[in-house]
Amino acid sequence: MTVKEFYEITGGDYDRVTELLLKDELIKKFVLKFANDGSYNSLKEAIADGDIEASFHAAHTLKGVSANLGFVRLQNAVSDLTEQLRPCTEQADPALVQKVDECYASVMDNMKELD
C-alpha cells in the first residue's frame, strides 16, 4: 500500500504530513520509526500498574507523537484518554483505553503493508 493509502485507512492527515515532510519516502521513514516508540507500551504498563500519573504522562506523550505523524484517529482517541486522566484522580476509563488500543492496532497492522 502507498503512504497515502496508509493514511486514508488509518484515519490520518496525509496532506498535513506531506506539507511538513514533503516526500513519501521521508514520511514512510518516520512512520516506520513509530513502531519503536515506547509511549504506547509505557501507557499500557502504567495502566496495568495502576499508576495514574504515569498513565497520564504516557498518554500525553503518545498524543504528541501521534499528532506529529498526522495519525488523527489515534491522536483523538489518546487525547480523550489524556483529558480523562489529566486530574490524576481516577484510573483510565476502560472504554477510552479500548479505543486507543483499536486505533493503535490499526496503525501498527497497516504499517506492515506499506510499500
Image (cartoon, rainbow, N blue to C red):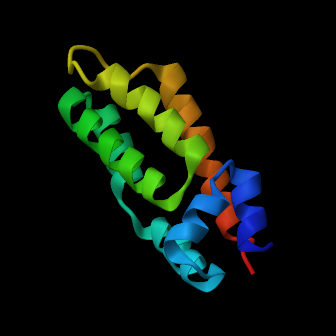
- Check the image and report above or below for 64 versus 31: above
Determine whether, in the image, residue 107 is placed left or right of residue 88: right
Choose between 7 and 59: the one closer to the eye: 7
Q: x%, y% of residue 105? A: 62, 50
Q: Residue furthest front?
A: 19
Determine whether, in the image, residue 34 is placed left or right of residue 9: left
Q: x%, y% of residue 32? A: 54, 74
Choose between 43 and 21: the one closer to the eye: 21
- Check the image and report above or below for 42 versus 54: below
Q: x%, y% of residue 52? A: 23, 27
- The residue positioned 44% from the left and 58% from the top of the image is 68
Determine whether, in the image, residue 38 is placed left or right of residue 113: left
- Check the image and report above or below for 84 versus 78: above
Q: Residue furthest top?
A: 89
Determine whether, in the image, residue 34 is placed left or right of residue 83: right
- The residue positioned 74% from the left and 67% from the top of the image is 4
Quarter that holds the N terminus: bottom right
Q: Residue furthest bottom?
A: 25
The number of discs equals 0
- The residue positioned 45% from the left and 27% from the top of the image is 80
Quarter that holds the C terminus: bottom right
Quarter of the image for residue 90 reads: top left
Quarter of the image for residue 37 reads: bottom left
Choose between 67 and 104: the one closer to the eye: 67
